[in-house]
């Protein structure tokens, strides 16, 4: 390879980019390296007068190619400079240039490109974009899609989810211990000459992330902490340095993309997850980092794994898995209320997302996972219970999608069209129709709330009590304790969580500090009460 001929000179380069769109700066090494993935460090600093500098790293992308990515947060002329650990490499060290960044158009339809990266809100209760726009999380799980979905299939899936109002997709980067291959035969890792990643595989991942981002979906990258497989205590393959370096390189590669990082994947607490989370944070301050835990044993007020990570400074928000509990619906729905509420009460507050709930099997009987036999009703109930108990987001799951063609009895195409996915679209439309981020859990104000989790109602109220939202899984009436003045008026309407149709309340009775609202029939309802000041 003639590296001199392939060297890209950037000393006088001028590039163009758009705010919040992925920009990639490419470099070409002049030197030969035994393992360019781990033996070369290239820091890249982007600066603009009056704006905080952005530090990132260039990552090895095959042969002599290195690249650094960024999504510029503001328009104007940005300059960059590189610094390589091998200062004699003129292709990587002391490269300089400028990027002219255009402002985002005010009518940009994609909220990601219009409003910017995600961050916790100032009060720590929900997620929002860089410009302050609240972000209502509706997620979906397709864990092995980077390995098992063809690009055209992925595009069709993303288009379907975008049309239904989903804005997060959760995918695993460590399927099969990192030794699995994508549909083009690219294995995630290469072992020649030492541990390293396979650039061809991650280039395919980047294409899928770009497609998702272009349709307004953020990609949660799950299971980063162990490229060789899940860790156990005393495991001889543990190498924190490898996990930390892998985390930094991932953060560098996707620094210009709308992604969220989760080192853990369905596992109990492990120090390696903390170490990798901290390493990712050294590369990016603008991306969310969480931990996707296992399902803790039932009966605890706050799930143990989430609590172990909660206070870590790198953790942007707490992700709870209320999970499947081997098909025990009573536990599945009880924890969707109690665990979420327990996490939402912790101080200092952090946003809470229910990142995995009972998967809908679409009326089918799974071949390999009989415990995943949830229904569309289970998906709806866990969603409303979570969101009215303090969660700022909910992730849905469908059997046949979360495992993408691993069970020949349920294809991803069939699972993509389960009726429950349309019900999630209704859920998103309902919450996005009002100021959901102002809601606070208030289920204790429901009079005579059933003890059985499958019948239990949930209630949330805005801080000024101008809006009350309740979920009624199988009732015709709800009795609520109020704190508002007796002169304040209450207007109530019921929404069908399946169709979204609006029904006027059959009766609204106010007696002192009690409000009774009755529907036209016993059914599953979402109740909205608007309070007018007297």
Image (tube, rainbow, N blue to C red):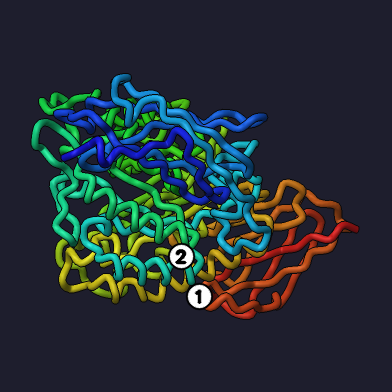
> Measured from the top left, where is residue 188 in percent x and y?
19, 47
Q: Which residue is nearer to you in this view: 216 or 499?
A: 216
Mark 2 vs mark 1, CA separation in Å: 9 Å
| Image quadrant where residue 521 sits | bottom right
443 relative to 424 in the view: left or right: right
Q: Which residue is nearer to you in this view: 52 or 217?
A: 52
Which residue is found at the position 55% from the left and 29% from the top? Answer: 53
115 relative to 243 in the view: left or right: right
Q: Which mark is residue 380?
A: 2
243 relative to 444 in the view: left or right: left
Q: Which residue is nearer to you in this view: 269 or 81?
A: 81
Q: Are marks 2 and 1 in contact (CB under 8 Å)?
A: yes
Which residue is found at the position 52% from the left and 59% from the top? Answer: 384
The secondary element bearing badge 2 is classed as helix
Q: Which residue is nearer to you in this view: 405 or 58?
A: 58
> Measured from the top left, where is residue 473 in percent x and y?
51, 66
Question: How many C-alpha atoms fall within 10 Å of the one at disc 2: few (<14), some, or many (≥20)?
Answer: many
Q: Which part of the image, by quadrant, shows the N terminus? A: top left
Task: Determine which residue is flagged by label 1.
Answer: 498
Which residue is found at the position 42% from the left and 36% from the top? Answer: 10
Q: Is residue 453 visible?
A: no
Which residue is found at the position 18% from the left and 61% from the top? Answer: 183
Q: How many marks?
A: 2
Q: Is residue 199 above or below residue 272?
A: below
Q: Is residue 84 above or below residue 382?
A: above
319 relative to 121 in the view: left or right: left
> Measured from the top left, where is residue 288 in percent x and y?
47, 40
């Amino acid at each position: 390879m003639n590296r001199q001929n392939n060297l890209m000179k950037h000393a006088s380069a001028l590039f163009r980019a758009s705010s919040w769109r992925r920009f990639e700066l490419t470099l070409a090494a002049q030197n030969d390296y035994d393992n360019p993935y781990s033996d070369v460090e290239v820091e890249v600093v982007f600066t603009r007068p009056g704006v905080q500098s952005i530090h990132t790293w260039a990552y090895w992308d095959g042969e002599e190619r290195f690249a650094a990515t960024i999504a510029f947060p503001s328009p104007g002329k940005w300059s960059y400079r590189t610094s390589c650990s091998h200062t004699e490499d003129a292709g990587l060290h002391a490269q300089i240039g400028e990027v002219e960044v255009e402002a985002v158009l005010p009518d940009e339809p994609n909220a990601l490109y219009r409003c910017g990266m995600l961050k916790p809100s100032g009060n720590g209760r929900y997620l929002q974009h860089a410009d302050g726009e609240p972000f209502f999380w509706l997620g979906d799980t397709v864990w092995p899609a980077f390995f098992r979905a063809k690009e055209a299939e992925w595009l069709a899936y993303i288009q379907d989810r975008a049309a239904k109002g989903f804005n997060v997709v959760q995918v695993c980067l460590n399927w099969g211990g990192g030794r699995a291959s994508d549909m083009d035969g690219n294995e995630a890792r290469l072992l020649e000459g030492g541990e390293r990643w396979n650039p061809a595989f991650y280039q395919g991942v980047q294409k899928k992330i770009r497609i998702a981002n272009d349709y307004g979906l953020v990609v949660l990258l799950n299971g980063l902490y162990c490229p060789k497989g899940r860790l156990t205590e005393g495991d001889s393959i543990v190498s924190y340095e490898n996990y930390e370096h892998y985390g930094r390189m991932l953060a560098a590669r996707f620094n210009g993309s709308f992604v969220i990082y989760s080192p853990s994947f369905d596992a109990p607490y492990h120090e390696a997850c903390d170490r990798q989370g901290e390493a990712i944070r050294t590369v990016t301050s603008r991306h969310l980092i969480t931990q996707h835990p296992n399902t803790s044993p039932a009966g605890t007020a706050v799930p143990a794994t989430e609590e172990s990570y909660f206070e870590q400074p790198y953790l942007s928000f707490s992700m709870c898995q209320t999970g499947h509990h081997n098909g025990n619906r009573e536990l599945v729905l009880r924890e969707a209320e109690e665990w979420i509420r327990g996490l939402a009460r912790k101080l200092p507050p952090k946003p809470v997302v229910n990142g995995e709930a009972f998967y809908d099997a679409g009326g089918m009987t799974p071949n390999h996972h009989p415990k995943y036999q949830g229904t569309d009703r289970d998906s709806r109930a866990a969603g409303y219970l979570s969101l009215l108990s303090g969660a700022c987001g909910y992730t849905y799951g469908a059997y046949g999608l979360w495992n993408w063609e691993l069970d020949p009895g349920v294809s991803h195409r069939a699972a993509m069209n389960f009726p429950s996915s349309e019900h999630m679209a209704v859920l998103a439309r309902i919450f996005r129709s009002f100021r959901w981020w102002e809601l606070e859990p208030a289920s204790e104000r429901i009079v005579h709330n059933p003890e059985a989790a499958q019948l239990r109602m949930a209630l949330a109220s805005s801080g000024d009590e101008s809006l009350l939202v309740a979920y009624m899984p199988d009732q015709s009436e709800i009795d609520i304790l109020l704190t508002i003045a007796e002169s304040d008026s209450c207007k109530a309407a019921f929404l069908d969580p399946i169709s979204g149709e609006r029904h006027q309340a059959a009766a609204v009775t106010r007696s002192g500090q009690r409000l009774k609202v009755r529907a036209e029939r016993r059914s599953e309802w979402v109740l909205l009460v608007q309070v007018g000041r007297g």
